[in-house]
Image (cartoon, grey):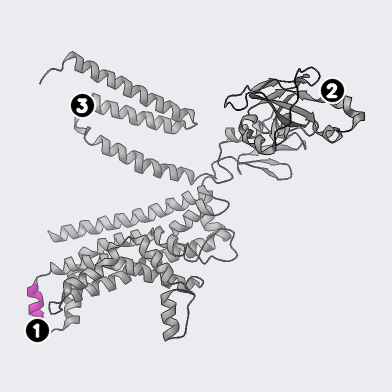
Amino acid sequence: MVKPEPWQIAVKWGVTVLAAAAALYLVFLIYQSGQPVWAVLALGLFGLGFFVYLSNAAFAYRYLFPGLAGMAIFVAFPLLFTVQIGFTNYSSTNLLSFERATSYFLDQLAPSEGAIFTYTLHADGSEFRLRLVPKHDEEDEQDEAKKKELDAHTYVSPPLALLRPDPPTEVKVVTVKEASWQESEPLPVSEIIKHRAVLGKIKVRLPDGTMLSYSGLRDFAPLEPVWRKNADGSLIQVKSGEVYKANQETGFYESASGERALPGFKVGIGFGNYGRMLTDPNFRGPFFAIFTWTVVFAGMTVLLTLCVGCTLAVLLNWEALSGRTIYRTLLFLPYAVPGFISILVFKGLFNQNFGEINHILNAVLGIKPAWFADPTLAKVMILIVNTWLGYPYIMVLCTGLIKAIPADLYEASAIAGAGPLVNFFKITAPLIVKPLTPLLIASFAFNFNNFVLIYLLTGGRPDFLNTKVPAGTTDILVSYTYRIAFQDSGQNFGLAAAISTVIFFLVALLSIVNLRLAKVNKQEGR
């Protein structure tokens, strides 16, 4: 073994130290964001990586570690994080942690109603000045009787370079009488709007120590806290004096009357989201209907694509059929065109008023089905479109499997006087069903999560009536989860994560069955 040069050793350990420092800094950032558990897991992963690449004892794992680490980061971590969310009330109203929600309330400020100042902005050479007048006195500005009183309450700022992005954060003003300043015409509102971002950064201190902040397009006012924290941890609303206590079961600050202060905070609710699937009547009805339709949709898609694809494969394998290559190419085109394009084309074809399908049905049968309004017709339409999209895949699979069947079997069958149907059910089907079964299970699992078709074609609609949870009659579990988590009001990420977890275990079960069948077929093939 060649001994490394000293400079090579120095470079190696220099890079190692820099990498370790970067890893520790990343772990610190994760911990600082309020995720100590994930910080510990990240520290363990980085530590394991350094051990594998610095220790000769783990030399054999140096090539496996990147793949295993990638699987942990991109597969295991999202899965565990989703499962974790499923045990919380994480939603659009409960996004923050308890500490951040409390800090949000305590940071809220509101203008004081008793001391609001209106202002005008005046050019002073290349700079600007603020002129502040008590708002309740502004209407009396032209009243000569109150001219002196008004002057005593009118203030002007020193010159301000308001066009700069970094104005002074605090400005001490003086009365108009004390300022040596020739007042110019106030700028119009259109000019003031240009400086709103800069005006919002300025704090104005009056001679009596009162601090004013920008509170509107034409107002400055002292800001006072909306909430104050009591010794027992509860919050009191300053204006109303009502006390709100943190409810660690619901994730909200609640008053004695049950009124909730928004936003809420994230808390663990155990199996609440999973129990809701079984016990909540507003959720159980559409959930079980959607689950049933998901299974029927995936199963019928596999059955229909198998029937169409296998039939076409048998026909295209008929040697007496001329132009088989052309037919095979044309029938494969639906698989070559991107699925989302085909789905949008079919969405136009099935349009009730302008679609070509309804034009033909109206001309021939005198009917114009409401494909998108009737739940049953919408489901039939989905199965038709998905059969069109899926049969080429089955056709190609069956074509390859049929080609592998020895021709001697068909010759012996012909000598015995058997017809095409007998050949199919006695020779073709039994020989292709075993290698085809795992692929059909994989197709079932794919269609179980076929979000793109549902989202682009119907969006899950038509919706169920009289349900508090948004749900559509053509939704499958994955599109239903998407609607709950991202589309409709009252987004409930915790509930969506629980449904996603259920979907994961269902698909995992199908994968296990698939692997078992593949293993059995491999053993039988020996």
Give the quadrant of residue 264.
Answer: top right
Expressed as whole percent of the image width and height from the top left, the position of residue 452 reads 40, 59
Give the quadrant of residue 345.
Answer: bottom left
Residue, x 43% and y 61% (percent of image)? 456
For label 1, the SS is: loop
- Nearer the observer: mark 3 or 2; the answer is 2
Residue 190 in the figure: left or right of residue 281: right
Residue, x 40% and y 24% (percent of image)? 25
The magenta segment? 407-413
Expressed as whole percent of the image width and height from the top left, the position of residue 44 reads 35, 29
Pointer 1 residue: 416
Of residues 85 and 190, the one drawn nearer to the viewer in this rendering: 190
For label 2, the SS is: helix
Q: Quadrant of the N terminus?
A: top left
Pointer 3 residue: 57
> In the image, what residue type sits under mark 1?
Ala
The residues bearing labels 1 and 3 have C-alpha atoms spaced at a distance of 68 Å
Of residues 421 and 279, the one drawn nearer to the viewer in this rendering: 421
> In the image, what residue type sits under mark 3?
Ala
Q: Earlier in the sequence, mark 1 or mark 3?
A: 3
Q: Earlier in the sequence, mark 2 or mark 1?
A: 2
Packing grade of label 1 (10 A; few <14, some 14-19, many >=20) is few
